[in-house]
Image (spheres, helix red, strand yellow):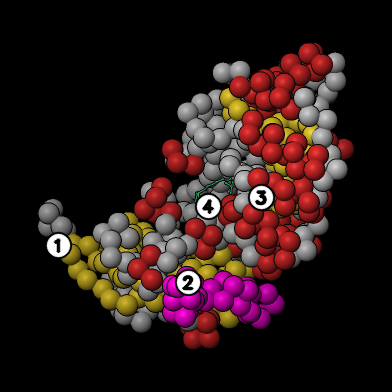
């Protein structure tokens, strides 16, 4: 049974506490819905991925780049910098956050499958350590930007190794029929290599692949490493020089439910080292520097969402059974993952010990949409009433970062808690914010 809560969550008399502060006190001070972030747990996880890469790969350890798309704000970017790891940004907006946090530029890696000329110019101007090129257009844009600015830019080429990772279709990224990367099998990856070599302003450092997200088994990482190292060996054979780097992306799965066994860095990275080493032996290639890009595995488990139940309803199903509908004060605008990917979450009543036996329940939001479901089916105490607080663990990744203003619902704040002190790091949106864009 895996733990779905962050390190400093505890329960006393049935009430949830984070770093000793009760859910009732948190809701009173910050309102609901709110994302509560366990700062110490975030720092521990970010540091653990960095240390595990170093201890597993030694001199061949590249960078751990925290994938900011999972959740990014200025304060979190500062923590990432302090933990000594790098940052993966994939838009000009994420790059602007890194800039505002004064993130060390040499530790920034710039991703994306459609980086504009302006975004690339800015990345080159700032001096980001690495750009991951995803198309021939981008290769030309990077070369032009570097030439105009009198710089040489380090890049990786994002490759598609043709792998069906076992995860939801929308978050698998390395099979052939996707928008990302240059396909190895079709020859487009090789054409990209030839294109890059025409540009003296570009330093090709190696290759990248990201096979997908919320992956709970290591097999697919081994296959990807093997195909990328075979490609590095082909490059060496053709050009008599070895490229020094490989970035194997993110995707390490976490526990949303107690039955999900997470991929923990101290277990996963030695096993990644083993598969990379075996592939190097197979292809007679010296071990390159290995980088990785965990997003979810760092931030996902560190937040829970606290909602207040506003209304409840009993629905009689065709089978004659009943289902209890619990409507919370957020929903698909702060957690789109259930309706988008069929993601599964668990929840607890956070403000008190439940007194009734459990009943089949559905946690839904306040949006005008039937699909506005946060948890499709969960056994919760039959005594839930309006005013009860409901906490959903493991919402740190792709929750707030994918939040929307659907139905003009303001996006929730993020409150960081460390050493029994809570502070807002992203404030709650207001109706004035929502109206502020209307011209
Ligand atoms: N590197 C690259 C190039 C990526 O595209 C991604 C995620 C990551 C790293 C980080 O993956 P992670 O370690 O967080 O799984 N919205 C979806 C996930 C989309 C992931 C997009 N790329 C979800 O909520 O599950």
- From the viewer's perspective, is the residue at label 3 or at label 1 nearer? 3
Determine the residue positioned at 53% across, 73% down.
413
Earlier along the polypeptide chain: callout 4 or callout 2? 4
Q: Residues within 10 Å of mark 4 (few under 14, many from 20)?
A: many
C-alpha gap between disc 4 and disc 2: 38 Å
Left or right? Give the position of 276 relative to 333: right
Image spot of residue 380 (x, y percent): 34, 66
* 313 up-or-down from 248: above or below: below
Tell me the SS state at disc 3.
helix
Earlier along the polypeptide chain: callout 3 or callout 4? 3
C-alpha gap between disc 3 and disc 1: 56 Å
Tell me the SS state at disc 4.
loop
Residue 63 in view of the camera: no
Kindly identify which residue carries mark 1.
316
Determine the residue positioned at 73% across, 61% down.
99
- From the viewer's perspective, is the residue at label 4 or at label 2 nearer? 2
* 437 up-or-down from 332: above or below: below
Whether 208 is among the magenta residues is no
Earlier along the polypeptide chain: callout 2 or callout 1? 1
Image spot of residue 1 (x, y percent): 51, 52
Q: Residues within 10 Å of mark 1 (few under 14, many from 20)?
A: few
C-alpha gap between disc 3 and disc 4: 39 Å
Kindly identify which residue carries mark 4.
255
- From the viewer's perspective, is the residue at label 3 or at label 4 nearer? 3
Marking on residue 118: 3
Earlier along the polypeptide chain: callout 3 or callout 1? 3
Tell me the SS state at disc 2.
loop
Kindly identify which residue carries mark 2.
437
Tell me the SS state at disc 1.
strand
C-alpha gap between disc 1 and disc 4: 32 Å
């Amino acid at each position: 049974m895996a733990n779905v809560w962050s390190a400093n969550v505890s329960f006393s008399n049935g009430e949830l506490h984070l770093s000793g502060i009760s859910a009732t006190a948190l809701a009173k001070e910050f309102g609901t819905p709110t994302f509560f972030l366990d700062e110490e747990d975030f720092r521990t996880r970010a540091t653990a991925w960095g240390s595990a890469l170093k201890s597993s790969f030694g001199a061949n350890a590249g960078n751990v780049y925290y994938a900011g798309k999972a959740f990014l704000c200025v304060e979190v970017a500062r923590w990432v910098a302090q933990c000594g790891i790098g940052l993966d940004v994939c838009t000009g907006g994420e790059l602007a956050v890194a800039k505002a946090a004064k993130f060390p530029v040499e530790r920034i890696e710039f991703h994306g499958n459609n980086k504009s000329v302006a975004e690339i110019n800015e990345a080159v101007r700032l001096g980001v350590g690495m750009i991951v090129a995803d198309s021939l257009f981008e290769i030309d844009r990077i070369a032009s930007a570097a030439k105009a600015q009198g710089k040489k830019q380090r890049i990786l080429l994002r490759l598609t190794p043709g792998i069906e990772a076992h995860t939801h279709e929308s978050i698998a990224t390395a099979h052939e029929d996707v928008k990302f990367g240059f396909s190895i099998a079709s020859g487009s990856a090789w054409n990209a290599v030839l294109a890059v070599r025409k540009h003296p302003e570009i330093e090709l450092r190696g290759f990248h692949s990201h096979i997908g997200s919320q992956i709970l088994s290591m097999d697919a990482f081994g296959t990807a490493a093997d195909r990328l190292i075979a490609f590095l060996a082909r490059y060496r054979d053709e050009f008599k020089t070895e490229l020094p780097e490989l970035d194997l992306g993110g995707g390490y799965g976490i526990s949303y439910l107690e039955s999900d066994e997470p991929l923990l860095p101290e277990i996963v990275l030695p096993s990644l080292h083993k598969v990379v080493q075996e592939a190097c032996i197979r292809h007679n290639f010296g071990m390159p520097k290995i980088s990785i890009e965990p997003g979810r595995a760092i931030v996902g488990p560190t937040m829970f969402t606290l909602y207040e139940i506003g209304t409840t309803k009993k629905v009689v199903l065709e089978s004659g059974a009943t289902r209890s509908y619990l409507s919370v004060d957020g929903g698909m605008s702060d957690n789109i993952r259930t309706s988008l990917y069929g993601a599964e979450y668990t929840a607890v009543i956070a403000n008190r010990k439940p007194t009734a036996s459990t009943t089949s329940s559905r946690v839904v939001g306040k949006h005008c949409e039937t699909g506005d479901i946060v948890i499709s089916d969960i056994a919760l105490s039959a005594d839930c009433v309006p005013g009860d607080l409901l906490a959903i663990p493991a919402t740190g990744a792709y929750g707030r970062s994918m939040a929307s203003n659907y139905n003009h619902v303001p996006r929730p704040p993020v409150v960081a808690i460390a050493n029994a002190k809570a502070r807002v790091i992203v404030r709650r949106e207001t109706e004035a914010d929502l109206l502020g864009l209307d011209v």
